[in-house]
Image (tube, rainbow, N blue to C red):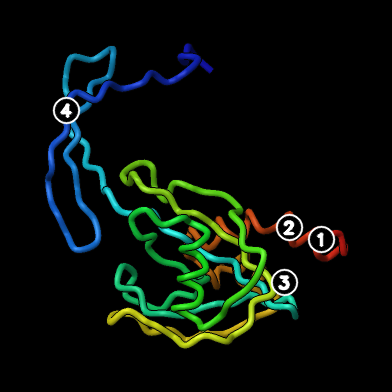
């Protein structure tokens, strides 16, 4: 195996400065230095607001999904509802808001399943993954000007099969399904 160090060393942030500002995120140029190297290195960090994604479970044990066009992949993506958390907004409240606005569904027993870093190599934000149970479609849709969704429900096991077979490729949706897995196992056993 060779002489590998036991732990990676922490780089020191020397300075940072704004690099670019866009409608949805800012980019910072951050200069770091490794403790064993003299050369400074530029890295670029995307600073975006935190996001929320929602596992919305109906009384019939179906999950609410949205299909929408995504510009980053120039194609359609099958996802769970979600969006940007407003400044100062609680992540669970944001999940309930996004669910209602995007799909018209409202529900009960909303709670945080967990939070992940979407891409810590270059992004500073987090995505919060929220579970909402007993959802039902009762609210009016309130899409942003650039939003347009196909809204559907599918049995939970079918959604997991889509994830395993490559029918769902959005990383944050896969994270949400991973964190939902133990809850789903308890529901199937009738323990929740």
Q: Residue at x 41, y 66 (%)?
A: 83
Secondary structure, mark 4, is strand
User: For the image shown, how many numbered marks are present on the structure?
Assistant: 4
Give the crowd class for mark 4: few <14, some 14-19, many >=20 residues within 10 Å. Answer: few
Task: Please state which of residues 47 and 136 is positioned toward the viewer in this rendering.
Answer: 136
Q: Which residue is mark 3?
A: 157
Q: Where 80 falls versus 130 (above or below)?
A: below
Q: State the CA–CA distance, disc 1 to disc 4.
A: 50 Å
Q: Are marks 3 and 2 in contact (CB under 8 Å)?
A: no
Q: Which residue is mark 4?
A: 15
In the picture, the quarter occupied by the N terminus is top right
Task: Please state which of residues 70 and 143 is positioned toward the viewer in this rendering.
Answer: 143
Give the crowd class for mark 2: few <14, some 14-19, many >=20 residues within 10 Å. Answer: some
Q: Which mark is residue 183?
A: 2
Task: Please state which of residues 33 and 147 is positioned toward the viewer in this rendering.
Answer: 147
Q: State the CA–CA distance, disc 3 to disc 2.
A: 13 Å
Left or right of residue 44, residue 1 in this image: right
């Amino acid at each position: 195996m060779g002489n590998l160090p036991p732990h990676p060393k922490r780089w020191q942030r020397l300075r940072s400065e704004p690099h670019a500002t866009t409608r949805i995120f800012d980019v910072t140029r951050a200069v770091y230095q490794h403790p064993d190297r003299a050369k400074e290195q530029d890295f670029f960090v995307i600073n975006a607001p935190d996001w929320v994604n929602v596992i919305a479970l109906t009384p019939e044990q179906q999950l609410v999904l949205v299909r929408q066009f995504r510009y980053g992949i120039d194609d359609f993506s099958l996802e769970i509802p979600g969006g940007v958390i407003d400044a100062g907004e609680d992540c669970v409240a944001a999940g309930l808001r996004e669910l209602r606005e995007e799909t018209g569904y409202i529900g009960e027993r909303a709670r945080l399943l967990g939070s992940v870093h979407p891409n810590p190599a270059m992004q500073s934000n987090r995505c919060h993954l929220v579970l909402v149970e007993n959802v039902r479609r009762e609210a009016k849709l309130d899409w942003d000007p650039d939003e347009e969704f196909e809204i559907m429900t599918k049995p939970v096991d079918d959604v997991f099969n889509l994830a395993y077979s490559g029918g769902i490729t959005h990383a944050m949706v896969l994270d949400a399904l991973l964190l939902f897995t133990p809850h789903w196992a308890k529901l199937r056993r009738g323990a929740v």
